[in-house]
Image (tube, helix red, strand yellow):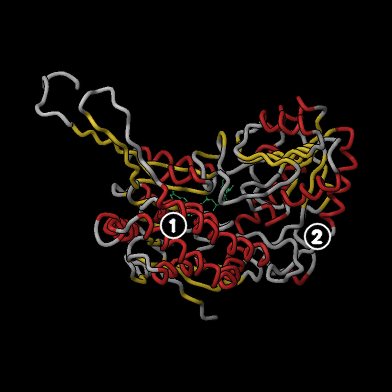
């Protein structure tokens, strides 16, 4: 039996295993083989991590640091990420099977969040209030919430963690990280950098394990002030309910069924490429996947042909190879789910115009692959158009005119993102106004930035990550009143 690499959690500055002594394994989606082991944590480990985070929030050097010093620590961390980007990207690929090129780009780019929020740390300002009461001075302060639990999914572990960590730490909170049980290794390796950057012990801690075994103890812990979650909408709804019992702050970044809308007046070459990047990049395993492409009827056949032609030539293979364009699905259950949706689409009467199977190439037999799959003649009432597949499966739907496009696009429980392809500027603005989604891209798709707020409408979530206002999600406001007069007036009436 192969010897597996072992990764351990960081709690209160110490490297720790699960109190039970149990482990679970991580499997490489390209080889189908287990390669690492992680502590299988439970309630006792959750307790230990929250206590460590709470101690670091209330005592020791972290609360004593000036905001400028906190910012410097974050910027130092950014430099260390840049130094180690290749190592983290390779670890991510082993864990989640996404392309090395994509993961390297993501890890390098994620350093920018720490630079940006590090810069923002000492620009958190309260204000002196005008007063309607004589001899009274009042001002506001912006203060951190306390212990934040950051729960992340398997598709972009380090980047999505960063979207939470950078603003949470810039605001002065402490954090317990719970990575996905499918992809925890890169996160644990990354957390080692915090000590090197000079963060005090206990400011960032981790707990690995299965959501149902360790999650509730974190979410319900009375010393946890906020849960920042990215994942599926069913898990998100469950966490929201649990957090409500303790009146905790919550941000939720959930799923999507995003429309990518192609008008006849668009540059169809660009639009076809935009459709491809929306669904086959990362093998469709992105919350912002443009999994519904809506095409104006007059150019429908032509656009379907163009998209199929590009997707047919996509190189499926080893995610570490520079030439690979489509990698495996991250988890085995997810591959089963994707294949089952393909069968559902067929029985619903959608026309499969590409893929629909596991690749026949014997070189790919060990990996969890699904061919890039395209369904034409999809009706927006079909399950394939309504439910999040989270895989390389595209539904192409036709529409008559702008009104029809808006109706179909918004006819979904989700509202994470939308794309519009048109050469008509007025139409692009009209569409952007009418689409019920947190992000609208015009003549592009799948762009994000540390400067740009990101989050969902409707069941795609609550709150925003990235952009300067993301820091508000990790702060609360205190109002201070100072009486400048001598004496206390009538104590039985409101002042
Ligand atoms: P998931 O909901 O299954 O798991 C997400 C995390 O929640 C994991 O760490 C898991 O262990 C944990 N968890 C599960 N049950 C829990 C519980 N009871 N208490 C606490 N934690 C619990 O999601 P996934 O399959 O890992 O990720 C895919 C989903 O994430 C998709 O729906 C996708 O759209 C969504 N996603 C959203 C965004 C966004 O920013 N909106 C980004 C990426 C992924």
Q: Secondary structure at mark 2?
A: loop
Query: Quick check: 443 above or below 210?
Result: above
Image quarter where the N terminus lies is: bottom right
Q: In the image, is 32 to the left or to the right of 423?
A: left
Ligand 1 lies under 8 Å from the Cβ of mark 1 = yes
2 and 1 marks in contact (CB < 8 Å) = no
Q: In the image, is 172 to the left or to the right of 276?
A: left
Q: Give the residue at x 29% y 59%.
A: 56
Q: In the image, is 137 to the left or to the right of 385?
A: left
Q: Give the residue at x 75% y 46%.
A: 394
x and y percent of residue 69 in the render? 37, 60
x and y percent of residue 33 in the render? 60, 72
Q: In the image, is 201 to the left or to the right of 426?
A: left
Residue 178: assigned label: 1
Q: Disc 2 or 1, which lies upstream in sequence?
A: 1
Q: Is residue 248 visible?
A: no
Camera-side residue of 356 and 79: 79
Instruction: Kindly give the residue lying farthest to the left in the view shown.
Output: 487
Query: Quick check: 234 above or below 323?
Result: above
Camera-side residue of 428 and 412: 428
Gap between marks 2 and 1, in whole Å? 34 Å
Image quarter where the C terminus lies is: top left
Task: Determine which residue is flagged by label 2.
Answer: 314
Q: Is residue 129 visible?
A: yes
x and y percent of residue 255 in the render? 58, 44
Residue 292 picture quarter: top right
């Amino acid at each position: 039996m192969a010897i597996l690499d072992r990764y351990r959690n960081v709690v209160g500055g110490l490297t720790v295993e699960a109190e039970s002594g149990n482990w679970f394994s991580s499997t490489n989606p390209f080889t189908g083989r287990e390669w690492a082991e992680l502590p299988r944590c439970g309630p006792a480990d959750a307790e230990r991590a929250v206590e460590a985070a709470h101690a670091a929030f209330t005592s020791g050097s972290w609360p004593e640091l000036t905001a400028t010093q906190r910012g410097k620590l974050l910027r130092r961390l950014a430099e260390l990420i840049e130094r180690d980007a290749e190592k983290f990207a390779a670890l991510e690929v082993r864990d989640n099977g996404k392309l090395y090129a994509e993961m390297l780009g993501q890890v390098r780019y994620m350093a920018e969040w720490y630079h940006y929020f590090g810069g923002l740390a000492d620009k958190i300002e309260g204000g002196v209030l005008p007063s309607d009461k004589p001899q009274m001075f009042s001002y506001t302060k912006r203060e951190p919430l306390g212990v934040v639990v950051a729960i992340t999914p398997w598709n972009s572990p380090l980047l999505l963690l960063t979207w939470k960590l950078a603003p949470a730490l810039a605001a002065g909170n402490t954090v317990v990280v719970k990575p996905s049980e499918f992809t925890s290794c890169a996160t644990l390796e990354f957390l080692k950098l915090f000590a090197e950057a000079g963060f005090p012990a206990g400011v960032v801690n981790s707990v690995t394990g299965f959501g149902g075994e360790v999650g509730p103890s974190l979410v319900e812990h009375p010393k946890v002030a906020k849960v920042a979650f990215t994942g599926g909408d069913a898990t998100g709804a469950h966490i929201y309910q649990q957090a409500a019992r303790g009146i905790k702050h919550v941000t939720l970044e959930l799923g999507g069924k995003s429309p990518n809308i192609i008008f006849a007046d668009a540059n169809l070459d660009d639009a076809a490429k935009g459709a491809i990047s929306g669904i086959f990049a990362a093998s469709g395993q992105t919350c912002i996947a443009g999994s519904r492409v809506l095409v104006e009827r007059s150019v429908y056949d032509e656009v379907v042909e163009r998209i199929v032609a590009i997707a047919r030539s996509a190189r499926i293979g080893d995610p570490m190879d520079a030439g690979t364009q489509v990698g495996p699905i991250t988890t085995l259950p997810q591959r089963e789910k994707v294949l089952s949706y393909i069968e559902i689409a067929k029985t619903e009467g959608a026309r499969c115009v590409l893929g629909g199977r596991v690749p026949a190439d014997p070189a790919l037999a060990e990996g969890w692959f699904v061919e890039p799959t395209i369904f034409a003649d999809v009706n927006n009432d079909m399950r394939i158009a309504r439910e999040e597949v989270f895989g390389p499966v595209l539904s192409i739907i036709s529409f008559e005119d702008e009104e029809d496009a808006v109706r179909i696009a918004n006819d979904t429980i989700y509202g994470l993102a939308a794309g519009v392809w048109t050469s008509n500027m007025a139409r692009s603005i009209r569409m952007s106004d009418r689409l019920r989604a947190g992000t609208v891209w015009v003549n592009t798709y799948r762009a994000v930035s540390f400067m740009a707020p990101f989050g969902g409408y409707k069941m795609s979530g609550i709150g925003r990550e990235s952009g300067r206002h993301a820091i508000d999600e990790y702060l609360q406001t205190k109002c201070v009143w100072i009486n400048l007069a001598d004496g206390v007036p009538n104590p039985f009436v409101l002042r």
